[in-house]
């Protein structure tokens, strides 16, 4: 007759010696909260960085389109003998300068 080592022997009050689990070390709740806060802060930083990159990309695309459209309008106005410097030319210049400034800022921020 074979006996299971985890079963108590006849007359024993408690579990067999092999069945007793070692006590798990108690975790410090303050340390656990600090670790949780640090993980949450890291997730927040990654999410903010990603949303910032998306916003810069969208702004750059919008400014590129506005620059292109204003240059095209300036060329069309010039071809038809209308005023081409003030309305479309100035808008194209302002949008171009803003696009260059945005891209310069983004490149320097990445470094």
Image (cartoon, rainbow, N blue to C red):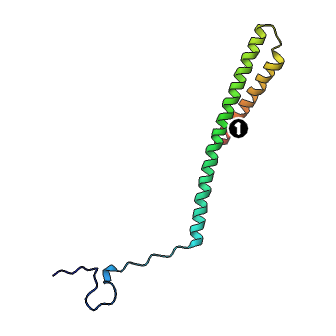
Question: How many numbered marks, from 0 up?
Answer: 1
| Place of residue 88 in the rendered image (x, y in percent of width and height, measured from the top left) | 79, 19
| Place of residue 58 in the rendered image (x, y in percent of width and height, measured from the top left) | 66, 34
Q: Quadrant of the N terminus?
A: bottom left
- At horizontal 58% and vertical 63% (from top left) the residue drawn is 36
- At horizontal 18% and vertical 80% (from top left) the residue drawn is 2
- At horizontal 63% and vertical 39% (from top left) the residue drawn is 54
Residue that label 1 marks: 105
Residue 25 seen by the camera: yes
Q: Nearer the viewer, residue 41 or 5?
A: 5
In the displayed structure, 108 sits above or below 20; it is: above
- At horizontal 30% and vertical 90% (from top left) the residue drawn is 12
In the displayed structure, 50 sits above or below 21; it is: above
The answer to which quarter of the image holds residue 51 is top right
Q: Residue furthest bottom?
A: 11
Q: Secondary structure at mark 1?
A: helix
| Place of residue 5 in the rendered image (x, y in percent of width and height, measured from the top left) | 26, 80
The answer to which quarter of the image holds residue 6 is bottom left
Residue 111 seen by the camera: no
Q: Nearer the viewer, residue 16 or 89?
A: 16
């Amino acid at each position: 007759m074979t006996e299971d080592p985890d079963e108590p022997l006849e007359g024993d009050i408690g579990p067999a010696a092999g069945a007793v689990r070692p006590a798990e070390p108690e975790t410090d709740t303050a340390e656990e909260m600090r670790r949780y806060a640090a993980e949450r802060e890291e997730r927040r930083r990654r999410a903010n960085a990603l949303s910032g990159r998306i916003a810069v990309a969208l702004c750059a695309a919008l400014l590129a389109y506005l620059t292109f459209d204003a240059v095209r309008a300036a060329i069309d106005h010039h071809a038809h003998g209308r005023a081409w410097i003030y309305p479309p030319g100035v808008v194209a210049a302002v949008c171009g300068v803003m696009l260059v400034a945005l891209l310069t800022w983004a490149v320097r921020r990445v470094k």
